[in-house]
Image (tube, grey):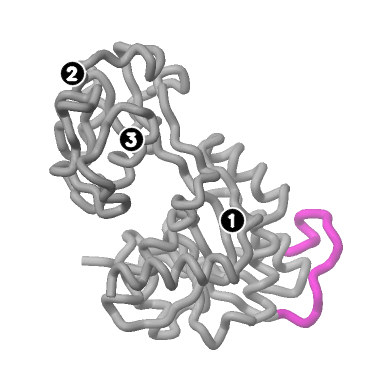
Amino acid sequence: MVVVVAAAAIAIPSWISGNKPASTSTATVKLGVDDAGSAYWKLVAQRAEEQGVKLELVSFTDYSTPNPALVSGDIDVNKFQHLRYLAQFNASQKQDLVPVGSGEIYPIGFYSKKWSSVAEVPQGAEVALSNNPANQVRPLLALKEAGLVVFKGDPGWKATLADVDYAKSRIGKITPIDPTQTAASLDSVDIAFVDSQFAANAKLTAQQEIYKESAERDDLQQYINIFVAKAKDADNPAIATLVKIYQSDEIKQAIHSEKGQDAVFRSDVPVSELKAVLAEQQKQFS
């Protein structure tokens, strides 16, 4: 069962922070997130208040709830998903939620305890990845980009495990496992795709991550994390203020300080381009 666990206003009085007084005219924005406990949101709220926007964070415990909450009007905007996820939601639920600002992308990569570089990975190597088919295409394309697998034909973003041509690939075996076990699998396999949180929990090092995809690849724009609102609120000035604050160097630095350096910010991608990527993705899911 999905539960909304908190809805807290965290606007910080300016007399506490020592900054200039907040505007006497304020607009309230309810923002749905899945990491409301992160300290950087307090800084976002403080800067928003200084510009006349009272930020209320609404915390969600999983990914299935924030979009329906946005559709129903329980929140004004959310920030938890990438464009591909939004495309799937819009197509399956026949909605028209829209991106209103770009955030960060988290490049995926693979780790190894046996090899220190991609060049060292031997012929016939074994790789572990998620057993969720929906989360396999991106690792497969990363393996292709790294020169470790060759596909039969050119499946692109429809690639599956069945498309791997092992006779032409350096990888000899792909083992799908529960993603929570990928870090532990490194004791037995050559390489493994490990989600950043699981990698941190397993204390994997940057040196053990022997490959990371390029966040600048055009085909990865679908994985940019975005602010999302209803179409009618696409030009809401209070939401635009919130997005601009989030994209500031100050907030980027705060996020990196709290969550590490994995996030690559793509605030250079305009909303018009985000919408174009979304439209293309929705065609695939319709």
When the figure is inspected, residue 104 is found, relative to residue 236, above or below; the finding is: above
- Decide which of 6, 195 is in the foreground and name it: 195
Mark 1 and mark 3 lie on one chain; the one further toward the N terminus is 1
Q: Residues within 10 Å of mark 1 (few under 14, many from 20)?
A: many
69 relative to 229 in the view: left or right: left
Position of the C terminus, as image quadrant, is bottom left
Going by the picture, which residue comes out furthest to the bottom?
232
When the figure is inspected, residue 64 is found, relative to residue 19, above or below; the finding is: below
Which residue carries the number 3 mark? 144
Which residue carries the number 1 mark? 41
Which residue carries the number 2 mark? 124
Q: Main secondary structure of the magenta part?
A: loop
The kind of residue tagged 3 is Lys
Q: Is residue 240 magenta?
A: no
The kind of residue tagged 1 is Trp
Residue 12 in sight from this viewpoint? no
The location of residue 12, given as percent across then percent down, is 68, 62
- Decide which of 102, 286 is in the foreground and name it: 286
The secondary structure type at the circle numbered 1 is helix
55 relative to 282 in the view: left or right: right
The quadrant in which residue 142 appears is top left
The kind of residue tagged 2 is Gly
Mark 2 and mark 3 lie on one chain; the one further toward the N terminus is 2
Q: Residues within 10 Å of mark 3 (few under 14, many from 20)?
A: some
CA gap, disc 2 to disc 3?
15 Å
When the figure is inspected, residue 9 is found, relative to residue 15, above or below; the finding is: below
Q: Which residues are magenta?
A: 12-26
Q: Is residue 22 magenta?
A: yes
